[in-house]
Image (cartoon, rainbow, N blue to C red):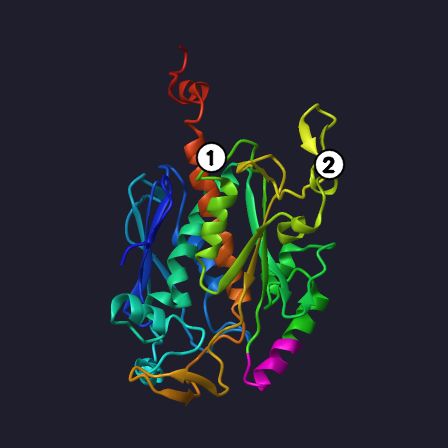
Amino acid sequence: MSGSIFGKNFRISTWGESHGPALGVVIDGVPAGLELNEEDIQKFLDRRKPGTSALSTPRKEDDKARILSGIFEGKTTGTPISIMVMNTSQQSADYSDIALYYRPGHADFTFDAKYGFRDYRGGGRSSGRETIGRVAAGAIASKILESLGITVECYTRSIGPIEADLTNYSREKVLKNPTAMPDDKANEEALKYVSEMREKLDSVGGVMECRIKGVPAGIGEPVFDKLDALLSQAVMSIGAVKAVEIGDGTEVSKKNGSTNNDAFTLDADNNIIKKTNHSGGILGGISDGSDIIVRAHVKPTPSIFSEQQTVNKDGKEITVQIKGRHDPIIVPRAVVVMESMCAITVLDLMISNMASTLDGLKKFYKKAGN
């Protein structure tokens, strides 16, 4: 299987399956000298691990990170960092039936069409547990970005028809609320809505949003490796994401140039800034210095407990009612995955940007006193 590697300079390779012995990631390109320990990784993994609220699968996993390489005396050495998380709560028998049929909304049929064989236990590589490696790598990328004054914060913007009020955004509420919403009232309404859908043996979709602050102007390549193109690829690669928007997103198709353009002006220190941010912090595929805004639309969990129509491997139409342990909504646990993929993408392009000008190379390699 190809396609398990992401990034050029800060490069990650995830490995493992939902019901295999373990999952993890190998990260290449981490600069030497970063203070790093397993607790730095664990804080991120705890935000995505299962069994933490009524909105997640009852599967209980500690998801304890173990760093296997690339660290010496509490600092990164510049060599590849390998991180492993053991699976401890697999119930593969819950999935034995689906070896014989294709679950609606899942990758069962497409995996068989591609490989002629699949790991049906919890979805194998197409399971949400694959994101463990992404989140572990994202924890490192985020720590590096923070040292550069850049923050990456994602949250739940909406669940079903329930929209969060962002006027009083609170990071503390995002990390506290089981919905990952920055709004207590919307959090309570969303919890009630998900509970109602769960009683109907149904699931719920929603929208995640990420705000990246502090990225200087000039990050991103102007053709194929545009900042918005790579962010879109990174976020769209998360399972269940069906649409990605930058800035005003699809709303720009309803506007005129006069209402969509962001006027430039000068701040008190004569720095160039924008009066508005319809572009979401990116122009021509390159950061413009304002907040980068990325939005992801997530489909409802396909694993629902009501009866559904499908076809088995013998080509017969059948009715199924799946078993197992499943999230009624994917969004709250996926927020940290989106945050991680955005951090990885921005850091990767920032490392590339160091060589975008001759002056940049000279500044980096010029010896002190010369």
Residue occupying image coordinates x 40% and y 61%? 132
Which quarter of the rendering shows the C terminus? top left
Q: Nearer the viewer, mark 2 or mark 1?
A: 1
Q: Is residue 198 magenta?
A: yes
Viewer-closest of 38 and 123: 123
Left or right: 295 as drawn, with respect to 188: left
The percent position of residue 304, horizontal first and vertical second, equals 49, 81
Residue occupying image coordinates x 34% and y 80%? 91
Left or right: 110 as drawn, with respect to 217: left
SS category of the residue bearing label 2: loop
> Is residue 92 placed above or below 228 in the rendered structure?
below
The percent position of residue 18, horizontal first and vertical second, equals 34, 70
Viewer-closest of 280 and 253: 253
Which is nearer the N-term, disc 2 or disc 1?
1
> Is residue 314 placed above or below 137 in the rendered structure?
below
Left or right: 245 as drawn, with respect to 67: right
Residue occupying image coordinates x 34% and y 76%? 90
Classified by dominant secondary structure, the portion drawn in magenta counts as helix
The percent position of residue 329, horizontal first and vertical second, equals 54, 72
Residues at marks 2 and 1, CA–CA distance in whole angstroms: 24 Å
Residue type at tag 2: Lys
Query: Which residue is labeled 2 in the image?
Result: 275
> Is residue 88 placed above or below 278 in the rendered structure?
below
Mark 1 nearby-residue class (10 Å; few <14, some 14–19, many ≥20):
many
Residue type at tag 1: Glu
Q: Residue furthest top?
A: 370
Say whether residue 160 is visible.
yes
Residue occupying image coordinates x 69% and y 37%? 262
Query: Which residue is labeled 1 in the image?
Result: 221
Mark 2 nearby-residue class (10 Å; few <14, some 14–19, many ≥20):
few
